[in-house]
Amino acid sequence: MEPEPPAEELADALVGVQRLIRRRLRAGTTATRLRGAEVELLRLVEARPGVGVTEAAKELHLAGNSVSTLVNQLVRGGHLIRETDPADRRAARLLLTEAAGARLRDWRERRAALVHDQLDRLDEADRDALRAAIPALRRLAENLHEEADRP
């Protein structure tokens, strides 16, 4: 049985891959750069149209006022639509603009193409190892998410 990879080595590898993907994708666009938290919020609104600010803050593990600031910036930038919640006139529901939806789709397509091209450069054994690691990496992410949700 192989020894477990050191936690620091795994964390560094994951961060390094993510950082390089972001840099490569950023280089291929002329659109105004969005910060990580802005993209996370847009992706959440895409997955859950009509999500409220309080729910989004909880889901993203951010303070409510931080999410309100992000919402204001994204509304001004033409990425989000803020509608009044008919069930609670004090609350807002968030929706993507068409432009933001198109931007996220373009980003996903370019990211998939980039990663696909890089996977093609690896030998079959490396591709198999990465494919086999996906379920464990998803469980790791779920565990981190669940732990963050605990009081």
Image (cartoon, rainbow, N blue to C red):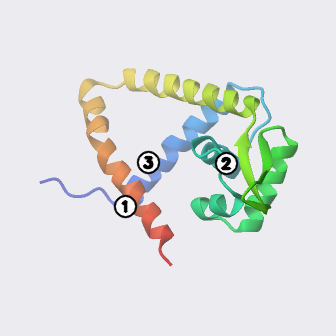
Q: CA distance from mark 2 to mark 3?
A: 35 Å
Q: Which residue is mark 1?
A: 7
Q: Residues within 10 Å of mark 1 (few under 14, many from 20)?
A: few
Q: Position of residue 74 (x, y in %)?
A: 80, 46
SS at mark 1? helix
Q: Is residue 134 visible?
A: yes
SS at mark 3? helix
Q: Which residue is mark 3?
A: 13
Q: Residues within 10 Å of mark 3 (few under 14, many from 20)?
A: few
Three-letter code for the amino acid on which mark 2 is drawn = Gly
Q: Which residue is mark 2?
A: 50
Three-letter code for the amino acid on which mark 3 is drawn = Ala
Q: Position of residue 129 (x, y in %)?
A: 26, 37
Mark in front: 1 vs 2: 2
In this rendered view, identify the residue nearer to me: 132 or 97.
Answer: 97
Q: Is residue 9 visible?
A: no
Q: Earlier in the sequence, mark 2 or mark 3?
A: 3
Q: Indicate which disc residue 151 carries.
A: none
Asked if 65 appears above or below 16 in the picture, the reply is below
Residue at 44% x, 69% y is 147
**Circles 2, 3 touching at the beta carbon (< 8 Å):** no
Q: CA distance from mark 3 to mark 1?
A: 10 Å
3 left or right of 97? left
Q: Residues within 10 Å of mark 2 (few under 14, many from 20)?
A: some
Residue at 44% x, 24% y is 116
SS at mark 2? loop
Residue at 64% x, 44% y is 49
Q: Earlier in the sequence, mark 1 or mark 2?
A: 1
Q: Position of residue 44 (x, y in %)?
A: 61, 48
